Image: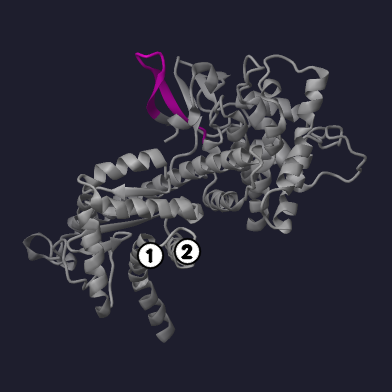
Amino acid sequence: MSGAKEGKNTDRLLGQRFLTVLNSLFNTARIHQDNNILLIQCVERFIDVIEELLQNDDEVTLLTSVGGFYLQQEKVLFQRNAAGLVRKLLDYFQKRDITGLRFYQGTTYASLSDILAFVRLLNDMENRDDPLPWLRTELEQAHYPWVDVIDGSETESLEAIFMENPEAGPQGSGTALASSSPGPGGQDRADRPQTEQAASGRGRQRQGDAGTEKKAERRRKRALRTYGYAMHSLQEVADKLRSNRQAGIGKAVHLVQNMVDLIMDDDNVLLGLSTIRDYDDYTFTHSVNVAILSVCLGHRIGMSRVSLSRLGLSGLFHDLGKIDVPKKILNKPGRLGENEFAIMQNHSMNSVRRIVRLRASYEKKACILLGPFEHHLRYDLSGYPRTPRKKPLSLIGRIVAIADVYDAVTSPRSYRATAMTPDQALGLMLKGSGSAFDPILLKVFINMLGVYPVGTVLQLEGGEMGIVIPPPPGREDSGELWLRLLAGDSRGGFQKQGIISLGRWNQTTGRFNRTILASHHPADFGIQPADFFF
């Protein structure tokens, strides 16, 4: 019993510890340079507390309201000897017109220099005539996607939450944001008429639905951030390697772990994002998509969390060697010549060489080498690089090979007039079952994506057109095909319409509830599928 009580007290004081670390970071950054050991330790303690807070939430929100601090919408409780800390930090925020700060998952793998640069911007605000607009301008130029500065409207939304649900506020915290008096007419809940209790039950059901939707929205935002950070991380590694600088994989490791967490919770959101296509940054979007598809497939066959992380890193770095391929070959329209194709084929071995030079432990690098080396070897070992080996491909190599080909043939490229629709791509890959691809893994992959994979544009009987989307919250396991209907707009593009279900695939009739006349690639209509999912 005493242990449980002690744990509860520790949780209650986490907010005080977070503010103490923030205060120490602000003050130490005023008097020391970035290489000072005390300042570095302050940053490390800050990241430790952020990681602890992010264990149960997708983001950390700190707000000032009614003369106190609210962390994750709960009032921060302090020990009596911390009154001076509260006053000091409130004064710090007020002088800068800051209502609060929000830290995202990316904070845990932000560089020390970026964190300190942001802190120094906050400190420098005190000397500005119009501090908040000045800070926003500075942040736009610096680009720190892992943090947001909150304006006064956020406290209004916080108070609105407490007004709707007074119990959300801390009990006995000293400041009431809303009344907790009995209901209309002074009736207690137990005295309400049954009809009112039934209405209350329906209200709780609606709150439950709203809670599910809110959780799904948080998951979507987290997935979008993870995708963006993965792109940025991969570009950063490639830029450093191109300029012969050392590059580490710390950020990539954190990102892939976050990716694994999302996929183990619900893989539909990240599968939807794997439809993102960027013509100018093909190599990077392709690599992130391959990582997502690989981890989703690995999860479907029951791989452990550790193995999924290794698989994700292999997918992320499988094409790293393409930075050594001249752009005139990489983006050449038309077929490659014999010598050009030989240079392109070297990218598998170049990926291995580049990974070996990354700043990481030997064990970590050894775990992610096979995927990049094997992803073009083919299941029957007839691919490249040529090797006398007789041993079958590794599981990671077989998975990355499937994800790589699927994303490649469904992506528009400079040398290809049209890309295959997702369903056409799966049909083509099925012909390579047993020769190019592991037949069992390919079958699982096709079942995972479905008859018409997410991102496929379908034309229905009756003239309607829509794009296949991930299932809505609460319907993930229904097995239904969901469609976001599309309507043309005045600019020649498309706008979102309602969502409909085409039901489940009927094995007997070989069709869904609605007749599908044709499938199209979203690029044929200038559509980025992810823009229509959420």
**Residue 248 placed where, x, y %?**
62, 50
* Label 2 neighbour load within 10 Å: few <14, some 14-19, many 20+: few
Location of residue 168 by image quarter:
bottom left
Residue 515 in sight: no
Amino acid at the residue labelled 1: Thr
- Residue holding disc 2: 36
- Residue holding disc 1: 28
Earlier in the chain: of badge 2 and badge 1, it is 1
What type of secondary structure mainly makes up the magenta span?
strand
**Residue 414 placed where, x, y %?**
63, 18
SS at badge 2 = loop
Model colouring:
one colour
Amino acid at the residue labelled 2: Asn
190 left or right of 275 in image:
left
* Label 1 neighbour load within 10 Å: few <14, some 14-19, many 20+: some
- Residue segment shown in magenta: 480-498
**Residue 266 placed where, x, y %?**
52, 48
Q: Is residue 296 above or below residue 38?
A: above
Location of residue 338 by image quarter:
top right
